[in-house]
Image (spheres, grey):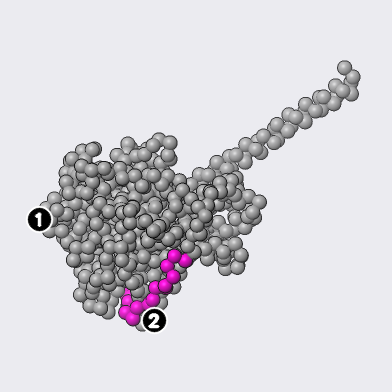
Amino acid sequence: MHPFRSYSLAVLCRLIVIAIIVVLPNESLLAQNIRNGEKLFDANCAGCHNFKQDGIGPQLGGLKNIVDRTYLTEFIKSPKAQIDARVARALDKAKKFGTVMPDFKQLTATELDDVVAYILEKPAPSVRISSGKMPLENPIVPAIAPSSIVLNLQKVMQFPFTNKTQPRTRINKMGFHPITKETMVADLQGKIYILTANNQPDVYFDATEHFKNFTNAPGLATGLGSFAFHPDYAKNGLVYTTHTEPKDAAKADFAYADSIPVRLQWVVNEWTVVDPRSRVLTGKPRELLRVNVVDQIHGMQEIAFNPYAKLTDQDYGLLYIGIGDGGAVEKGYPFIARDKNHVWGKVLRIDPTGRTSKNGQYGIPKTNPFVGKDGLDEVYAAGFRNPNRISWTSDGKMLVTNIGQRQIESLYLIKPGKNYGWPDREGTFRIDSTDNVNNVYPLPKNDARYGYSYPAAQFDHDEGNAIMGGFEYTGKQLPQLRGKYIFGEIVRGRVFYVNLNEIKEGSQATIHEFPLMLDGQPTTLKELSKASKVDFRIGQDAAGELYLMTKSDGMTYKVVK
């Protein structure tokens, strides 16, 4: 062999070896960055974003070569800073989605790089064939008008911070002890507080001490969901709680096909309290049911007993459970919520002290509408994306507020066996779930044949992003609020009402907005919380008086004269 040729071949081999040593580790490192980014995205971003279609926030597929990497990194770090700097893309997204994403300054520079690397590797979603009909850009044109009734607020307390970043707390539901009448507030992080006479929060219950698999990660509706006292609590000491656990923590009573991912499990437990008058929940839990969900969003937001049911009523002692679609529709599985024999997207009704269910842990009320028919025995009503609150009025109306997708927020008057439309309807509008669930269209001319029931009140996303259920005012301090159902909007913190005599199935009541005052000065919850997302909740004490809570800063205000 020619010496020069031998030398060149040797050099060439060395160069190949160097390339393998240098290039492949870099490629491997990039792959590792993307895998780390996927985990971080799943934990921090997936509740609002996906790569198929817009959700709470925009879909993020196909951004490579469209969005600058530096901008994306800075936006994730602090969206508000980008908006304040008048960056065009940031302004456009804030306007379109009506809210501002929280800062993620807690992520390190390396973690931000990994998340961005993962996002930029995701391709654009496939283009769906349009039905040819134009979606409605402004489904509900009339704006909500301010009321002449002003709500005067009084600061009550600020709950202990459980987060380093906003929302500072995750206070989610207010109730009261059925014997002592003390006010109680649940935080999704796992605690139920019971307030002292001078409004100091003592811990009544801490889920982290009782459930080894308890998780409140990745946030956004995960954690300790709700609590409810049995109407015979003084005699039987029964309390009910709901919480989330990781996927596969235990076998689910309600599951779907193995090919569909499971993100979390929602669990309902019954507690037999040793001392019903105790200010600390003592006893052991008994699991009633466990439900798989596709994603962390739209889970089991509410459990409740009808407070007006008498011992002789068929509703007495029956537990209502609101469970959303678990993100199934946004993730591309609308059939999960649509199926009559599935638990998702439904309001359930069970007898927690019975044992006739399939798993033998609770009872099936014989008066449930689908018993002996096509449909799941536990189902009371169907067709909800996220039935976040259930309440009753003194004249017997059952009301459910349903958080919508991209367009409509709804209040429903519930009747047994009725279907309220999701994922084929949003409010009084049609959705094509095979196309894009963010679009709504007018109802078809032959709509009556489908048998859907429509809201008693609704508003679109010009007014707010997410409805928050409330209560009929039953207190004595504010007679001007009598005859009104008071509710609100989570993100912007607006407070609304409708007159109870206008609540009728399928006929939309007029919504009014309460102006707010604090210390004699006009204000808003957004101003008070100094947060782009107020995370507003409504509470009611044992006397029927109203409270406004803001998760963003943990503040509680009482509505006073």
Q: Is residue 146 magenta?
A: yes
Q: Quadrant of residue 355?
A: top left
Secondary structure category for the residue under label 1: loop
Q: Is residue 67 left or right of residue 58?
A: right
The residue that disc 2 covers is 521
Q: Amino acid at mark 1?
A: Thr
Q: Is residue 491 above or below residue 230?
A: below
Instruction: Pick the residue in front: 339 or 248.
Output: 339
Magenta includes 298?
Answer: no
Q: Residue furthest left?
A: 312
Q: Nearer the viewer, residue 530 or 329?
A: 329
- Mark 2: secondary structure: strand
Q: Position of residue 68 (x, y in %)?
A: 64, 55
Q: Is residue 369 left or right of residue 105?
A: left
The quadrant in which residue 16 appears is top right
Check the image and report above or below for 330 versus 196: above
Residue in view at x 19 percent, y 51 percent: 318
Residue drawn at x 42%, y 44% is 333
Residue contact at pointers 1 and 2, CB within 8 angstroms = no
Residue occupied by mark 1: 312
Residue 48 x/y as whole percent: 47, 54
Callout 1: few (<14), some (14-19), or many (20+) C-alpha neighbours within 10 Å? Answer: few
Residue extent of the magenta highlight: 138-156
Give the label, 1 or 2, closer to the camera: 1
Few, some or many residues within 10 Å of mark 2 (<14, 14–19, 20+): few
Tell which circle, 1 or 2, labels the residue nearer the N-terminal end: 1
Residue at horizontal 43%, vertical 36%? 259
**Whole-percent x, y for residue 15 in the image:** 77, 31
